[in-house]
Image (spheres, rainbow, N blue to C red):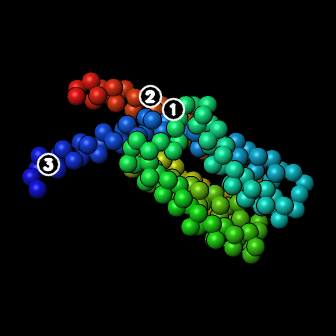
Amino acid sequence: MGMSENGTKDQVLSHLKVEFAVKQKKGLPFIMASAVLWTIMLIAFLANLDIATKNIIAMCCSALLMPVGMLFGKILKVNIFGKDNPLSSLSIVAALNQLMYLPIVLWAMYTVPDKMIMVYAIVVGAHFLPYYWIYFSPTYFYASIIIPIASLIFGIYFGQVIVCVAFVAFDIIICILLCLENKQAEKYLKAITSKE
C-alpha cells in the first residue's frame, strides 16, 4: 500500500468525521438533554426525600436521555439517526457503551446508595472519551478526564448535591464549548468542500 493511498484514506476519513460532526452538531442535543435531566436530579437530591427515592428518580432521568435528546435534536434540526455517514453506527455503539457499566451503578444503588450518583456521574463522564475521536472534539477529551475525577472528589468529600451541581455546570460548559467547536467545524467543512 503506497503512501499516497494511505494519505487518501486518511483524507476521506477526516472528511467523513468533519461532515458527521457538523451534521450531528457534535452531539449537542444530548448534552442539552443531559443538562435538563441533571437539573431534575439536582432538584430531587435537594428535596426532602429518602435516598432510595432520589436514586430511583436519577435512574428514571437516565432512561429519558434518548427521548429528550431526540426532542432537542428536532429543535436543532439534527437527524440523530441519520444513516448517510458510516460513523453514525460508531457513535451509537459509543453511546450504548455506558450501558455496559450500568450494573456497577445498580450495585452502588443497592450497596452504597449515598454514593450511587457519584458512580453514575463517573460512568457518564468517562463515556465521553470516544467522542473526542468521532467528532474531533477536545471538549469531549477533557470532559472524559475532568468529570470522573471531579465527581469522585465531590462525591467523597462533599456529597450528592454537589455532584449534581457540578454535572449541571459541566454540561452547560460543554454546551458552550461545543457551540464554538461547531462554528469552527462548519467553517472547516465549507473550506474543504470548496476545494473539491
Q: Quadrant of residue 35?
A: top right
Q: Earlier in the sequence, mark 3 or mark 2?
A: 3
Q: Residue at x 69, y 73 (%)?
A: 107
The residue identified by callout 3 is 5
The residue identified by callout 1 is 179
Estimate the spatial distance between the alpha carbons at disc 3 and disc 2, rounded to whole Å: 31 Å
Residue 78 seen in this snapshot = yes
Task: For the C terminus, give its image quadrant.
Answer: top left
The residue identified by callout 2 is 183
Q: Are circles 3 and 1 on residues that touch, CB within 8 Å? A: no
What SS does tag 3 mark? helix
Q: Can you give x and y, in whole percent of width and height, for residue 128 in the image?
A: 51, 53
Residue type pointed to by label 2: Lys
In this view, the mark in front (3 or 1): 3
Residue type pointed to by label 1: Cys
Q: Are circles 2 and 1 on residues that touch, CB within 8 Å? A: yes
